């Protein structure tokens, strides 16, 4: 990467984008002038691969759903990206390693190290997944990518040295995560129904009742946080069911998150926002790959950024479940169908249904906004500015609606953001418009995620002293 304003930016790279790239590389926190990076899922097939780090980040993203929900996927991504980061920094120690592997042999191939680290980490994690056609397809994808990266062998000295250090890095992080609590993601849920108490969400129009899940994730060992309750989430004002804060939050989500209202306004911005974030806007690895495309960051910088991003996401979701199952606050669908919560300003609706399916855990704080807060803060700290505009385009799946309304068909939705904070605010709105969260819990989630993202970046993988 060029490091002087007298040098010429690479083709297709704006001066402001170059300034941000330099700031990221040097750890500069100066607020740079506004810059623009246009990212679009539609254009992804036409983008040239940046390097092996981003290539393998995408492969890990495609494999991660084999492990379960967002919680398990975040753990997998953090492990893979740490293996890649440590393998590269065993070749050239630009940033502090997470594990205690030694240095690579002289001349080791960085690309071989990246491929071996990612392959070994993913393959090792897949040994715990039950056999299925999906698992077989994932293994085949990993092996095909590896063969493309390093070839069939025999290998020259540099390639073999890279493979060796990549395997060592993956083994080291996999060993650290043995018995980290992730093998018991769910615990029995025994709280009896009552006003304000979370329960299995009554979604009779959906295929099944949504059973409380992921209480055990609160006991997973964090990657960087000292413990999962390190950043306290204070009780919400909405916990007082007779109060004004609760009645306002109740009536907001009852109105804007109603499936009948959203279904009658399928092309409204509120409906688009609700549909965009699950699986689309919430994919921070894809967003980050598109943000960094063309910035000129090298493999070490990419490896550090993606490791920090995924550590923060993993720790945010661990902490999120800790506080969800501390407060056990009910979801809107339970609250709005409840016969009488004692508040005269919250009128029940026994047939009310949220626009989107309610996730299987308590309301407060919200998980997707927690992840958004963590991701946006890592990016903000890494680039030294909140002004990181981006556009994402996502094919949102079809949405079932209450009879006699017809389902909404799949729809291509694009969202543009002038800043990272604007994206986080949009994620808050999305969960309210979806009818699955009260606003205060989403705001609390972003605050906690932001604290976690900042802590992760400032405490781990620091630039090495030369």
Image (cartoon, rainbow, N blue to C red):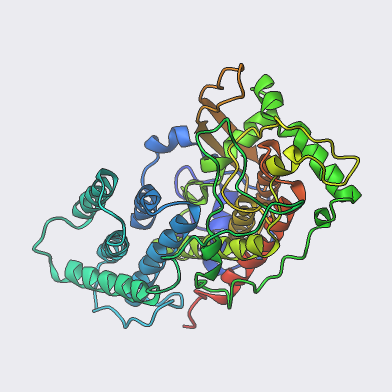
Q: Front-most of 405 and 117?
A: 405
Say which residue appears at 60% left-offset and 20% top-offset.
403
Query: Looking at the image, which is closer to me, 265 or 89?
Result: 265
Residue drawn at x 80%, y 56% is 239
In the displayed structure, would residue 64 be above or below residue 167? Answer: above
The location of residue 264, given as percent across then percent down, is 68, 20
Does residue 384 appear in the picture of this structure? no
Q: Position of residue 120 (x, y in %)?
A: 27, 64
State left or right for residue 277 relative to residue 68: right
257 horizontally vs 379: left or right: right
Q: Is residue 349 above or below residue 51?
A: above
Q: Position of residue 378 (x, y in %)?
A: 59, 61
* Residue sitting nearer the eye, 215 or 89: 215
Residue 1 sits above or below residue 131 on the image: below
On the image, which quarter does residue 429 sit in? top right
Q: Residue at x 8, y 63 (%)?
A: 154
């Amino acid at each position: 990467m060029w490091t002087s304003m007298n040098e010429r930016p690479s083709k297709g790279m704006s001066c402001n984008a170059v300034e941000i790239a330099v700031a990221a590389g040097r750890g500069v926190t100066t607020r740079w002038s506004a810059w623009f990076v246009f990212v679009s899922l539609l254009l992804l097939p036409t983008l040239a691969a940046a390097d092996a780090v981003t290539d393998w980040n995408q492969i890990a993203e495609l494999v991660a759903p084999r492990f379960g929900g967002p919680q398990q996927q975040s753990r997998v991504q953090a492990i893979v990206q740490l293996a890649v980061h440590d393998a590269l920094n065993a070749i050239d120690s630009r940033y502090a390693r997470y594990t205690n592997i030694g240095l690579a042999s002289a001349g080791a191939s960085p690309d071989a190290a990246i491929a071996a680290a990612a392959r070994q980490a993913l393959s090792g994690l897949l040994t715990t997944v039950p056999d299925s056609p999906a698992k077989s397809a994932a293994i085949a994808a990993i092996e095909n990518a590896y063969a493309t990266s390093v070839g069939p062998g025999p290998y020259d000295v540099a390639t073999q040295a890279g493979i060796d250090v990549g395997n060592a890095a993956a083994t080291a992080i996999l060993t650290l995560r043995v018995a980290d609590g992730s093998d018991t993601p769910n615990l029995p849920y025994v709280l009896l129904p009552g006003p304000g108490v979370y329960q299995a969400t009554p979604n009779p129009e959906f295929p099944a009742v949504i059973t409380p899940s992921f209480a055990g994730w609160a006991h997973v060992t964090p990657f960087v946080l000292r413990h999962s309750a390190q950043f306290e989430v204070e009780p919400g004002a909405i916990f007082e069911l007779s109060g004004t804060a609760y009645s306002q939050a109740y009536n907001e989500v009852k109105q804007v998150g109603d499936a009948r209202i959203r279904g009658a306004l399928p092309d409204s911005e509120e409906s688009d926002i609700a549909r965009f974030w699950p699986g689309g806007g919430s994919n921070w690895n894809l967003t980050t790959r598109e943000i960094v495309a063309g910035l000129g960051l090298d493999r070490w910088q990419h490896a550090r950024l993606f490791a920090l991003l995924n550590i923060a996401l993993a720790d945010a979701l661990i902490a999120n479940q800790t506080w969800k199952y501390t407060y056990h606050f009910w979801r809107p669908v339970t609250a709005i169908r409840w016969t009488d919560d004692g508040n005269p300003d919250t009128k029940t609706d026994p047939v009310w249904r949220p626009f989107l399916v309610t996730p299987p855990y308590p309301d407060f704080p919200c998980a997707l906004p927690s992840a958004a807060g963590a991701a946006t803060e890592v990016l903000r700290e890494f680039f030294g500015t909140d002004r990181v505009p981006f556009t994402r385009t996502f094919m949102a799946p079809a949405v079932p609606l209450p009879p006699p309304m017809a389902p909404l068909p799949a729809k291509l939705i694009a969202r543009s953001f002038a800043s990272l904070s604007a994206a986080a605010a949009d994620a808050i709105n999305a969960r309210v418009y979806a009818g699955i969260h009260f606003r205060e819990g989403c705001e609390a989630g972003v605050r906690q995620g932001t604290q976690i993202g900042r802590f992760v970046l400032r405490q781990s993988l620091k630039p090495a002293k030369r």
